[in-house]
Image (cartoon, rainbow, N blue to C red):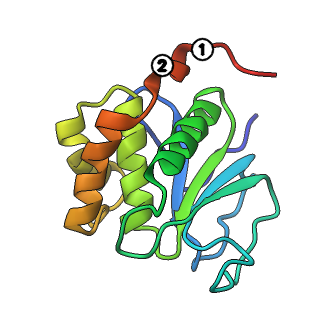
């Protein structure tokens, strides 16, 4: 029997992802196969106090703000969603696990087929009631809808 990915939610298409705050300990059970982490990566101006022990990518994304490089963020969110959709255990996390993580989960809900205009409400109902904390994060979700490259979603996996 496969152990459940503790703390994960199912996106509207059934794809499973885990959102959390890096301040909290890693939940029990299987570790992620991949993590998408939002904030300053280890070795950046402000040294992150935590480094994952599994494959990961970082999106430079200040707390309570939007990504420093929106196109890079959109590409990494889309790639992480694809990994999760293929059955890999994917974790999304920022320091607190609410604003930035909620913003990414709302974008992933859109990739999973949920209507963009309701993605924040869906995320708040399925992840955390306070997810997506700022007006800028709300606006960035709208930017994501207009600018992400969803043509790669149905492309064959690269090996």
Q: Residues within 10 Å of mark 1 (few under 14, many from 20)?
A: few
Q: Decide: is 30 above or below 98.
A: above
Q: Which label is found at residue 28?
A: none
In the rendered structure, the answer to whether residue 125 lies left or right of residue 12 reads left
Residue at 25%, 50% in the rendered image = 120
**Residue drawn 24% across and 68% down?**
134
Q: Position of residue 44 (x, y in %)?
A: 68, 78
Where does the C terminus fall, quadrant-wise? top right
Q: Are marks 1 and 2 in contact (CB under 8 Å)?
A: yes
- Please give the residue where the numbered disc 2 appears in the rendered image: 151
* Quarter of the image with the N terminus in it: top right
* Residue 146, image quadrant: top left
The answer to which of 148 and 15 lies nearer the viewer is 148
Along the line of sight, the residue nearer the viewer: 131 or 155: 155
Residue beneath the point at 30% across and 61% down: 132
Q: Which residue is mark 1?
A: 155
Q: How many marks?
A: 2
Residue 147: which quarter of the image?
top left
Q: Nearer the viewer, residue 109 or 9?
A: 109
Give the percent coordinates (x, y) of residue 16: 54, 38
Q: Is residue 1 above or below residue 154?
A: below
Residue 20 image position (x, y, % from top left): 52, 64
Residue 137 found in image quarter? bottom left
From this viewpoint, is residue 139 visible?
Answer: yes
Say if residue 8 shows up in the picture: no
SS of the residue at dot 1? loop
86 vs 148, left or right, is right
Q: Is residue 46 left or right of residue 51?
A: left
SS assignment at label 2:
helix
Q: Residue at x 69, y 84 (%)?
A: 49
Task: Give me the C-alpha separation between circle 1 and circle 2.
Answer: 7 Å
């Amino acid at each position: 029997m496969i152990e459940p990915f503790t703390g994960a939610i199912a996106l509207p298409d059934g794809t499973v992802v885990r959102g959390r705050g890096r301040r909290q300990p890693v939940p029990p059970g299987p570790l992620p196969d991949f993590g998408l982490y939002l904030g300053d990566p280890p070795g950046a101006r402000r040294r992150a106090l935590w480094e994952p022990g599994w494959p990961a990518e970082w999106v430079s994304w200040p707390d309570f703000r939007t990504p420093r490089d929106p196109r890079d963020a959109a590409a990494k969110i889309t790639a992480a969603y694809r990994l999760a959709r293929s059955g890999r255990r994917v974790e999304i996390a920022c320091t607190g696990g609410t604003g930035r993580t909620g913003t990414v989960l709302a974008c992933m809900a859109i990739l999973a087929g949920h209507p963009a205009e309701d993605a924040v409400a869906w995320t708040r109902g399925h992840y955390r009631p306070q997810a997506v904390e700022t007006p800028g994060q709300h606006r960035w979700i709208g930017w994501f809808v207009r600018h992400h490259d969803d043509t790669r979603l149905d492309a064959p996996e690269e090996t």
